[in-house]
Amino acid sequence: MRVVVSDTSPIRYLVLIGEADLLERLYGRILIPHAVSVELQTQQTPEAVRTWMHAAPSWVEVNTAH
């Protein structure tokens, strides 16, 4: 199984253009570090992205570093 880890930028901009589901279609599931989750929900982040992250789809998994 291929594991895909994403940082903030791809998620942020795909959400803003309405194409976040492209990540699921390409990879099935993505992992994001907890720090990325926090960054996607800060006050400086566009509201659409914060809203999306607050109710992130099931194919997005937030992981903490080990």
Image (spheres, rainbow, N blue to C red):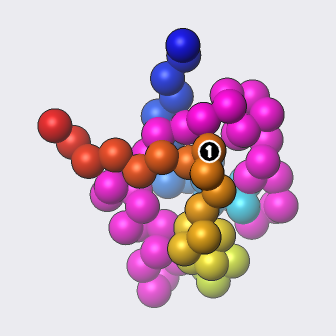
Residue 28 is at least partly visible in this image: yes
Question: Tag 1: Cα neighbours inside 10 Å, few (<14), some, or many (≥20)?
Answer: some
Does the magenta run of residues contain 44?
yes
Tell which residue pokes out farthest to the front in this image. 58
Image coordinates for residue 24, horizontal then vertical, percent:
72, 38
Which of 16/25 is in front?
Answer: 25
Tell which residue pokes out farthest to the top in this image. 1
66 with respect to 23 (left or right):
left
Q: Is residue 40 above or below residue 28?
A: below
Does the magenta run of residues contain 4?
no
- Locate the N terminus and report the quarter of the image it occupies: top right
Image coordinates for residue 48, horizontal then vertical, percent:
69, 77
Tell which residue pokes out farthest to the right in this image. 18
**Which residue: 62% across, 44% down?**
59
**Which residue: 79% across, 34% down?**
25
Residue at mark 1: 59
What is the number of callouts on the image?
Answer: 1
**Which residue: 74% across, 52% down?**
20
37 with respect to 1 (left or right):
left
Q: Is residue 18 above or below residue 44?
A: above
Image coordinates for residue 65, horizontal then vertical, percent:
21, 42
3 with respect to 51 (left or right):
left
Residue 46 lies in what quarter of the image? bottom right
**Which residue: 68% across, 31% down?**
28
Write the start and end of the magenta stretch as one range: 16-45
Residue 7 is at least partly visible in this image: no
Question: What amino acid is labelled 1 in the image?
Answer: Trp
- Locate the C terminus and report the quarter of the image it occupies: top left
Q: Is residue 33 above or below residue 24?
A: below
Which of 56/35 is in front?
Answer: 56
SS of the residue under disc 1: loop
Image coordinates for residue 13, horizontal then vertical, percent:
68, 57
